[in-house]
Structures are given as C-alpha cells and as structure tokens.
C-alpha cells in the first residue's frame, strides 16, 4: 500500500526547510543593508561635524591658495597648522583619512602628505 503520510511528511519537511533558508537569507540581507546605511549616516555626520569644527580655523588658507600652482602648498605654514588642527580634532575618533580641497579641487591638506597639491577634476587626479 502507498504511504501518503510518509511522503507528505517528507515533502512538508523539505518545503519548511526551504522556506526557513529563504527567510533567514532575506533577514540577513536586510540586517546587513540596515547596518551599512547606519554606518554611512554616522560617517556623514562625523564628516559634517569635523568640517564645521575645522573650517573656522582654516578658512583663510583655501581662499589664499593660488589656483594655478599648488607645488608650494606643503611648504606653507598654514598646511602645518591644518595638520595640527586635524590631529587635535580627531584624537580618539575612528577617522581614517581627511582631505581638504580648494574650490578648484586642489588638495591643500591630506592625512597622506604625498597627496597634497593634487588637483581633482572630472574623476582624475593630476599633480599640479
């Protein structure tokens, strides 16, 4: 005699496992997306807070930087002052890198000093 109850139980178990796997995968992806969004918002808030704290102290330097020649930027006294200000304001914070640009896109400060005096235009990086 054909045992319907056994096959129904096996089919139900397979279906239940498949549904559980799908639900767990969707929940995991949703939780991961929420975590990424939260981290992104926190990074944006930290960036705005740092910008608001740094700008009053350095606002004259980006405006006084020549737009055609950035080679003298690392040698200027203001670049060292920006570095000291950044170190002071980011002490104890999980900040990986800070870059300050002029309105023309010239890097006047970077936590990686070799990037100072680079111009960023249309997605390309060029040394002035």
Image (cartoon, rainbow, N blue to C red):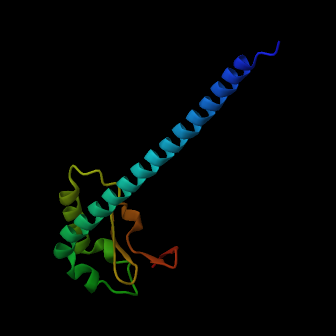
Q: In what quadrant of the picture does the C terminus appear?
A: bottom left
Front residue (pair 38, 44):
38
User: Which residue sits at x=58%, y=39%?
Assistant: 22
Give the x, y percent position of residue 91.
20, 52
In this rendering, is residue 16 above or below 63? above
**Which residue is farthest front?**
1
In this rendering, is residue 94 above or below 122? above
User: Which residue sits at x=71%, y=17%?
Assistant: 6
In this rendering, is residue 47 above or below 107? above
Report the side of 23 relative to 101 (left or right).
Answer: right
In this rendering, is residue 74 above or below 62? above
Give the x, y percent position of residue 116.
37, 70
Residue 1 quadrant: top right
User: Which residue sits at x=54%, y=39%?
Assistant: 23
Report the side of 27 relative to 22 (left or right).
Answer: left
Front residue (pair 77, 51):
51
**Which residue is farthest top?**
1
User: Which residue sits at x=69%, y=26%?
Assistant: 11
Residue 90 quadrant: bottom left
Residue 48 quadrant: bottom left
**Which residue is farthest right?**
1
Front residue (pair 79, 20):
20
Q: How many marks?
A: 0
Give the x, y percent position of residue 100.
32, 71
Report the side of 57 relative to 75 (left or right).
Answer: left
């Amino acid at each position: 005699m054909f045992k319907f109850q056994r096959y129904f139980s096996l089919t139900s178990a397979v279906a239940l496992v498949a549904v559980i796997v799908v639900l767990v995968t969707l929940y995991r992806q949703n939780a991961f997306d929420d975590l990424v969004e939260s981290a992104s918002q926190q990074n944006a808030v930290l960036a705005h807070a740092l910008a608001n704290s740094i700008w009053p102290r350095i606002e004259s330097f980006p405006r006084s930087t020549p737009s055609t020649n950035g080679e003298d930027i690392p040698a200027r006294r203001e670049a060292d002052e920006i570095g000291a200000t950044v170190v002071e304001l980011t002490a104890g914070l999980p900040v990986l890198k800070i870059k300050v640009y002029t309105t023309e896109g010239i890097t006047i400060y970077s936590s990686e000093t070799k990037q100072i005096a680079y111009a960023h235009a249309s997605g390309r990086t060029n040394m002035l």
